[in-house]
Image (cartoon, rainbow, N blue to C red):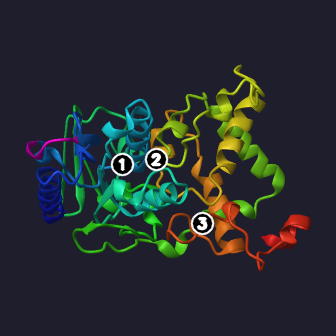
Amino acid sequence: MENVEKKLREEAKRLLSEKKVDVVVGYEAGTLPLTATPCFITTPEETERLVWNPFCVQNLGKFVHDLLNQHHEAQKRVKPEARRKKVVGVVTRGCTSRSLVIQLQEKQYEREEVVILGVPCGGYVDRKKLSALTGGEEIREGSLQDGRISARTWNGEHQAVLKELLADNCLTCRFNRPVLADIEMGEAATAAEAEREYEAVRAFENLPAEERWAYFEKEMAKCIRCCACRNVCPSCYCRICFAEQSQPQWIGIGSDPSDTQLFQLMRMYHMVGRCVDCGSCVAVCPMGVDLRKFLKKLDSDAFELFGHRAGVALEEPAPLGAYRENDREDFIFDPKSGA
């Protein structure tokens, strides 16, 4: 990781020095132990802040989209002869690169407006698992060395193997290197349990319908509709979200359980063929709602019914955005036949 981090800083410094990018979106050390936070580097001197380690959680594709979208809107108010292009550099792992592919497919910006700094990824630490390790106690100091995490609290030191604390989506990730990159650094990481990618989906599918619905109701009852999942998602960028529309009003603003269920259901279906399983929504959820189980089911269906994996190739659009004569259609009239 140290060599990757060093190369990353060098490449970011070169891009900024040569004015090939206006900003580099990456990660820097967080203010709390064992954390990293997104950062925006605009000068060559600032590149020393960049880090790359298993504490880098958020999918940076969201920031790329928002930066370029804001720039495009601002340029509309500028005289044509004074308009200029903005180029964003971004530190990119496998899932982030897939999000960038989706954004490019959906014409959110042009390919020349982004420079992709590809880094290998062996997964990131799940903060909830780390909190469980320390019994919820505040971490005063922490370190990562030789594949082991050490966290010191007021009541002592806690240790664990890194793999034991990785997010569930990272354990079954098949894309440990970016699918699209301008500059690549480091050696490819090895997928931990890729063959188990849909194991949890299969187990859930085999439950009786009543149990599946009961689980959905239980999880949705936790949701406080803070919209953190929507706000962090790199594939959520409608100019006006259905959740905030008043004409028509899709969902109420009260605490009726059906409104919360409908909000999550509609958001999930907007992710069909577009969710890259980056886990950002789960990571930021303050209530611990199990969103991934349902999103992974949609991902499984897209792959098994249409042979599609979200954001794998620029020339392969999402199933709901393309038509092929050999598309399977029997599941439309007989849902049981498509499973």
**Circles 1 and 2: CB distance less than 8 Å?**
yes
> Residue 204 appears at what percent x and percent y?
69, 60
> What is the C-alpha distance between the residues marked 1 and 2?
7 Å
Q: Is residue 157 visible?
A: no
Which label lies toward us, 1 or 3? 3
Who comes first in sequence, dot 1 or dot 3? 1
Q: Which residue is mark 3?
A: 317
Give the foreground label among 3 and 2.
3
Label 1 sits on residue: 57
For the point 23% across and 38% down, the residue is 30
Residue of label 2? 280
Name the kind of residue labelled 1 in the image. Val
Residue at mark 1 to residue at mark 3: CA–CA distance = 26 Å
Crowding around mark 1 (Cα neighbors within 10 Å: few <14, some 14 to 19, many 20+) is many
Query: Which residue is at a point 81% across and 57% down the rendered structure image?
Result: 208
Hey, what amino acid is under mark 2? Ser
Of pointers 1 and 2, the one earlier in the residue sequence: 1
Judging depth in this view, the residue of 8 and 1 nearest the camera is: 8
